[in-house]
């Protein structure tokens, strides 16, 4: 993985250094002796290479120096400037030389990308752990989606079944109500008939010797008689104690509280549970 970023940077640096040296020798060789031009070109490439090496050393130590970085970019800009100046002054192939004038800047940019890759690089163990966590998260999300879809389908099926059952119950109730209504109408017509009413009245019990009760229709629907509530005078504590003691000692051995309370209420007496238990404690 490291070679994917360092090899392009090395190749671009080598090409730009060769181009810079060639341009300096060709360009300055006309005005000065070629050894001098060669020294100038090697000086530009050497300064660039030296600052690059120092930057790489600082990066390996986890450090960074802005001054060294500025010097390196200055050498890169100088090399690019030499190529641009040669392209502008060349009489032939000016466009070709101008097209490669960006190589020094591109080489510096590739080294910058490589440094960023090194600062963010992880070990294979960490990468495997991250992949495992991501895969686990994807598995949990897939299971949750499947569970939600299953619950949605189950709920839809249940609602459909409940709706259909409710519809069937409603139809049965409507049919039953219609049948009962028809039967009730028939009973009402029978009751309203003169001959039938006289016959039904003759078989009912008489309330008085001379008056016969009128035959009534049965009640249609739930009916539960509610007994009348009779309020009587509340027992005093002394009377309550006496009754509790009599009921408790009516048998040998003496009755328990539950048995005494059952017989107390069966005898028609009334008292709150609190008062009855307090009386039991007093006499027992």
Image: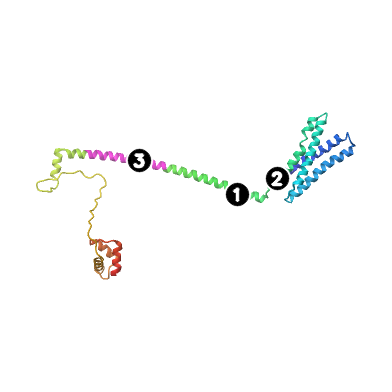
Left or right of 90: which side holds 242? Answer: left
Q: Are marks 2 and 1 in contact (CB under 8 Å)?
A: no
Tell me the quarter of the image containing the C terminus.
bottom left
Residue 259, relative to residue 176: is it above or below?
Answer: below
- Magenta stretch? 159-185
Viewer-nearest of discs 1 and 3 = 1
x and y percentages locating residue 254 in the rendered image: 27, 69
In the picture, measured across the screen, residue 233 lies left or right of residue 112, that is: left
Q: Is residue 142 left or right of residue 37?
A: left
Q: Residues under labels 1 and 3: Cα distance?
A: 52 Å
Q: Earlier in the sequence, mark 2 or mark 1?
A: 2
Category of crowding for the residue at label 1, using alpha-carbon neighbours closer than 10 angstroms: few (below 14), some (14–19), many (at least 20): few
- Which quadrant holds residue 197? top left
Q: Which residue is mark 2?
A: 116
Residue at 82% from the left image edge and 38% from the top image edge: 20
Q: Is residue 176 magenta?
A: yes
Mark 1 or 3, nearer chain start: 1
Residue at the disc numbered 1: 133
Residue 18 at x, y = what percent? 82, 38
Residue 265 belongs to magenta span: no
Q: Quadrant of the N terminus?
A: top right
Q: Among all residues in the image, which is located at the extreme front?
A: 67
How many C-alpha atoms fall within 10 Å of the one at disc 2: few (<14), some, or many (≥20)? few
**Mark toward the start of the polypeptide (3 vs 2):** 2
Front disc: 3 or 2: 2
Residue at 75 percent across and 49 percent down: it is 58
Q: CA distance from mark 3 to mark 2?
A: 72 Å
What residue is pinned by disc 3?
Answer: 168
Q: For the point 85% across and 34% down, which residue is it?
A: 27
């Amino acid at each position: 993985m490291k070679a994917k970023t360092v090899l392009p940077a090395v190749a671009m640096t080598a090409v730009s250094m060769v181009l810079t040296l060639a341009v300096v020798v060709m360009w300055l060789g006309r005005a000065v002796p070629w050894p001098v031009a060669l020294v100038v070109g090697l000086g530009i490439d050497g300064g660039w290479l030296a600052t690059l090496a120092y930057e790489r050393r600082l990066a390996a130590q986890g450090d960074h120096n802005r001054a060294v970085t500025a010097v390196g970019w200055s050498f890169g800009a100088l090399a690019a400037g030499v190529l641009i100046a040669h392209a502008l002054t060349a009489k032939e192939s000016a466009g070709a030389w101008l097209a490669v004038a960006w190589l020094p800047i591109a080489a510096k940019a590739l080294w910058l990308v490589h440094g960023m890759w090194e600062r963010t690089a992880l070990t294979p163990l960490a990468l495997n752990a991250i992949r495992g966590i991501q895969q686990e998260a994807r598995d949990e999300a897939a299971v949750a989606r499947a569970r939600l879809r299953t619950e949605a389908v189950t709920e839809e099926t249940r609602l459909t079944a409940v709706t259909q059952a409710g519809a069937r119950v409603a139809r049965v109730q409507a049919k039953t109500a219609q049948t009962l209504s028809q039967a009730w109408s028939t009973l009402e017509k029978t009751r309203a008939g003169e001959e039938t009413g006289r016959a039904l009245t003759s078989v009912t019990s008489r309330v008085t010797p001379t008056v016969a009760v009128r035959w009534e229709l049965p009640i249609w629907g739930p009916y539960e008689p509610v007994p009348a509530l009779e309020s009587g005078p509340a027992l005093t504590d002394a009377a309550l104690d006496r009754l509790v003691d009599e009921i408790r000692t009516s048998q040998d051995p003496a009755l328990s509280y539950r048995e005494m309370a059952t017989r107390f209420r069966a005898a028609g007496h009334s008292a709150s549970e609190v008062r009855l238990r307090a009386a039991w404690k007093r006499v027992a």
